[in-house]
Amino acid sequence: MPNPTAAMLVIGDEILSGRTRDANMYHLAGALTKHGIDLREARVVSDDKDAIVSAIRALSASHDHVFTSGGIGPTHDDITADCVAAAFDVPIDVREDARALMAAHYGAQGAEFTAARLRMARIPDGATLIDNPVSIAPGFTLGNVHVMAGVPHIFEAMLASVLPTITGGTPLMSQSYRIDRGEGVVAEPLRDIAERYPDLSIGSYPFQKGGAYGTNIVIRGFDGAQIDAAMLELATLFPRD
Amino acid sequence: MPNPTAAMLVIGDEILSGRTRDANMYHLAGALTKHGIDLREARVVSDDKDAIVSAIRALSASHDHVFTSGGIGPTHDDITADCVAAAFDVPIDVREDARALMAAHYGAQGAEFTAARLRMARIPDGATLIDNPVSIAPGFTLGNVHVMAGVPHIFEAMLASVLPTITGGTPLMSQSYRIDRGEGVVAEPLRDIAERYPDLSIGSYPFQKGGAYGTNIVIRGFDGAQIDAAMLELATLFPRD
């Protein structure tokens, strides 16, 4: 059975304006690969209702899972929860269990449970909450869409909460090999190996160090013995100095 | 006149598998903002022909410019140029001026001009070359799609070559203000300011430092006087300690 597929949707003007460097894509990609879920696509859109709703609909229809990052805080530009509700055409309102969690948390902190913070308890009908051990205000799963915060350590905590609830597949394995020659020299023998191992994904990543060109080869696949065999061919063709 | 819009397309399995952290999105976003071009969306897709062709078609139709990153090297998994040709339904072949540039470069280096390297001189019909001062093999512009390398220092050099040829708009200006209080406390007065300045984009970015919550406010817009006025209101509401 093929592995489940996934897409990521990053929501935030701050990434597209160049103010902030997205950190969650790299984390999610690594975590999904380990869990046996194939991340096929990632999109970044701005805090714009139409853009978010249409991206959620498109990605949700074409992948087994969608993971979103950003736009679920207390401020006026946090519109992700409303957009997910709109994408699935379900109502959204303050949910009692989410509200109670947050009331207890702010109470214990002596912090005010403002109307703005109460917005974070607004959850689309039919969703399941995603635990947030860091700052309590929950994420949620609606259909195949998992909605998480953008702040990296909260995103990571929420992902750790939701990932064990998702059935994964075979973890993708990989091995890499550094060749101290340019990609242009490596390319032809590499293509030959790639043709003889159609089940493996063989990637080639050029680098430059101290003025010299080199190439990192990464072989990925689900069958460890095949990866070993291709790796051995590569090492025979380009032995270490 | 509104600013030109743009989308980015990052091509590469290595980003989606979590092997590599994309660096070009952050660089492009900052450069476009300075040039007065609004980056509206970014997508990351794998080295898959159908995925690349359909993303190029969708993004090219809905934005003034598309900037791509990755997949134009010499190896079998470098299929971006062919995909751009397919998306625009034009032929692609080795182009003499690109071949001559590269032959001179490899000749001067005493490096072999392999068949694999010659693949990098394959340019879709009707394209304009993008200068690559780093490793010579050029990028190209076809229609409104600007095709550049994925290696960050080559991407940056190609972008520096192509950006002056593109008419920009009004550079987006921004000011930021740090408030040492949580987003939940800041949200309501902020929403009030945002409603009174509909031409400004007011973003709120929570952070946590040494156990205390804080919020960075970023006000963006094209009218400096309006940004100053909104900033003054914010500083009056939340004076520095």
Image (cartoon, coloured by chain):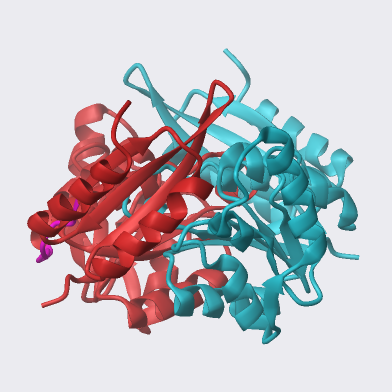
Chain colours: A red, B cyan
What residue is at 66 percent from the left and 47 percent from the top?
B28
- Seen in the image, is A4 located left or right of residue A213? left
- Seen in the image, is A191 located left or right of residue A239? right
Which region is colored magenta? Answer: A166-173
Tell me the quarter of the picture where residue A163 sits.
bottom left
Q: Quadrant of the C terminus of chain B?
A: top right
Which residue appears farthest toward the top when viewing the image? B241
* Residue A73 in view in this figure: no
- Seen in the image, is A36 located left or right of residue B222? left
The location of residue B140, given as percent across then percent down, is: 74, 61
Position of B237 relative to A162 (above/below)? above
What residue is at 63 percent from the left and 28 percent from the top?
B177
Report if residue B22 lies within the magenta region. Answer: no
What residue is at 38 percent from the left and 71 percent from the top?
A84
What residue is at 26 percent from the left and 68 percent from the top?
A196
The location of residue A76, given as percent across then percent down, is: 54, 54
Q: Quadrant of the N terminus of chain B?
A: bottom right
